[in-house]
Structure formats: structure tokens, C-alpha cells
Image (cartoon, helix red, strand yellow):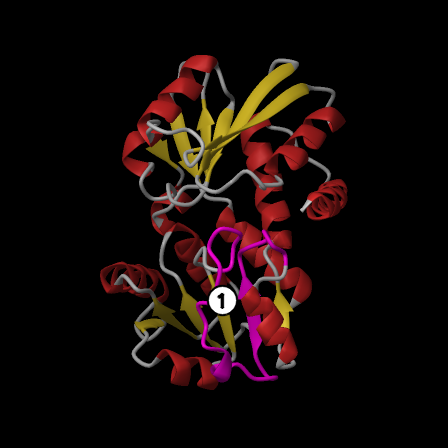
Amino acid sequence: MIDRQALLGLLGANIMKSLAPALHIDAFAAAGITGHYHLMDVDHLPGRTLRGLLDAVKTAGFLGVNVTFPFKQEIIPMLDALSPEARQIGAVNTVVIAKDGRTTGHNTDRGGFRLNFEDHLGRVAARGKTAVLVGAGGAGSAVAFALMDLGLKTLIVHDKDTARAAALAAEVTAHFGAGSCRLSNRLSDEIEAADGVANATPIGMGGFPGNPVPVSALRAGHWVADVIYSPMETELIQAAAAKGARTLTGGGMCVHQAVDAFRLFTGIDPDVTRMHRTFMDALAVRDAAS
């Protein structure tokens, strides 16, 4: 059992519009726990380092922290242990801190993306199909493995950092077999020929304007997924919808990964339906304020 008072937080950059505090604080309330969720945005904390922030939350007695861009891979060497899934993916978005300060990294993004995809597009949209993944960082690694979990036949990976893309393609191939994943050579042509495309870059998020996907390659037969929910409808999602494609925003992924993270932090299973409702209420408040 955890104490009736608890601390959680989020480590990252450009996170001040995150809805994670609303989700976790409401889950605490539902469990009868007084909880606080603290945003530690390095854009607003000059001079702080990831190592320093991790040491601070350990000293302060946090149950754990979520981790987002740009730290999902950088934090791994700083942790005492990794879950098998986090080790396989090579990215961490949830760190559980034991009472003795020992840290264990987990990845709930993989399950979060998979469940969101199943909820809104269905497994049939991925099974036996080809998709292009734009972005091979921490989020991209989780999305890559989630798409393969859904039965994708071939994943094509694109990233400005070709070494990072190559490393992810090699990891996916090692786990799912020869021919399951390859690097992108001609992004527009590959997207046009594929069944779907997923954006796992920060491009399109508030503070990172733009669209990482060539709009001319999108068509009505595609599904188009984005991990971003700030804003809910990114330039990519808007462009895909205008072409008649089926779209998937990052909102459901945010909720599903938070459900798993809260369980890891507390040992308590939160109400998924309630968390979805909390997310939508918090989103409406945030957007109204904007």
C-alpha cells in the first residue's frame, strides 16, 4: 500500500500544457489519496539537468515520474533497472521509484498506442499491411513495436537522423523477423503506396509547428496516426482528414499510457472510462484558455 499522500511528476521539455496532472490527480482522488503531479519542464528550469531532476525527485520521495521528449532514451543509463518491455523498445516513459530510491524504467507508450489504435481504427487496419513511421526516437520506438504487435507486415522507418532510424529498423527486424522493417528511401512514394502513416516526431506540437509528412502523398485510403495531443488536431491530422483519410489523434494514447503508468506507480487500477472523461474535460478547459 502507498501512503495516503503521494507525489508524481513529468520530466521533459515544452510540457506546460500537458494533461497528465489532471489525469493522475483525478485518479488519486478516486482512490482516496491526496496526490500532487508536478511538471518539471527544462524549458522553464534553466540550468537543471535530467540527472539533477531525477536525483531531486528521488530525494523528495516521489513514487515515480513520467518521462517525455527529449529524455525517453537519455534517461536509460541513469536507472537501476528496466522492465523487459522498456529494454526491448529502448525507451522509457515511466520511472517507478522504490522507497529505498531504486529506479525502474518502464514503457507504457507501446500499450497506449496499441490500445488507442484498436479502439478507433481496429486491428484489421494494421494486420498484414504496410505503414510508414516518421520519427525513430523514444516515441517512435514504442509506436514501431506497437504496430508490429497489431500484426503489421512491413514497417518503413524515416528519421532525419539516419543512424537512429537504422538502429530502430534493426531492433524491429531482430524481434519480428527478416523483411518486417526497413529504412525509408523515398518518403513521398512510400507513404503513397502504404496503407498508413504514423507521426512520432514532436513536429505539429505547440512550439514545434509544421507537418513532417508530405501532404501530396496522403490519400483517402490511408489511416494517419499522430502521437501528439497538444493540439489535438495537428496540421498532419487536419491535412489527412481533408484528403478523406481515417485519422487517429494522440488523445487516446495519452489516456491508455497514463492508466498503465498509474498502476505501476501505485498498484491501483484506475477507472479507464473515468480517465477518458477526465481527459476530455481537461482538454476543453485547456483549449478554452488558449
Q: Is residue 223 magenta?
A: yes
Q: Residue at x 39, y 55 (%)?
A: 141
Q: SS for tag 1?
A: strand
Which contiguous range is marked in magenta?
204-232
Q: Is residue 125 visible?
A: no
Q: Position of residue 249 (x, y in %)?
A: 61, 60
Q: Could you tell me which residue is drawn at 46 percent across and 43 percent down? A: 107
Coordinates of residue 99 in the picture (x, y in percent): 46, 15
Left or right position of 60 against 286: left
Residue 142 position, x and y percent, is 44, 54
Which residue is under mark 1?
198
Q: Nearer the viewer, residue 113 or 1?
A: 113
Label the magenta part by its dominant secondary structure. Answer: loop
Name the one closer to the observer, 119 or 160: 160
Decide whether residue 211 is among the magenta residues: yes
Residue 57 as seen in the image, left or right of residue 170 = right
Q: Is residue 157 left or right of residue 243?
A: left
Q: Quadrant of residue 93?
A: top left
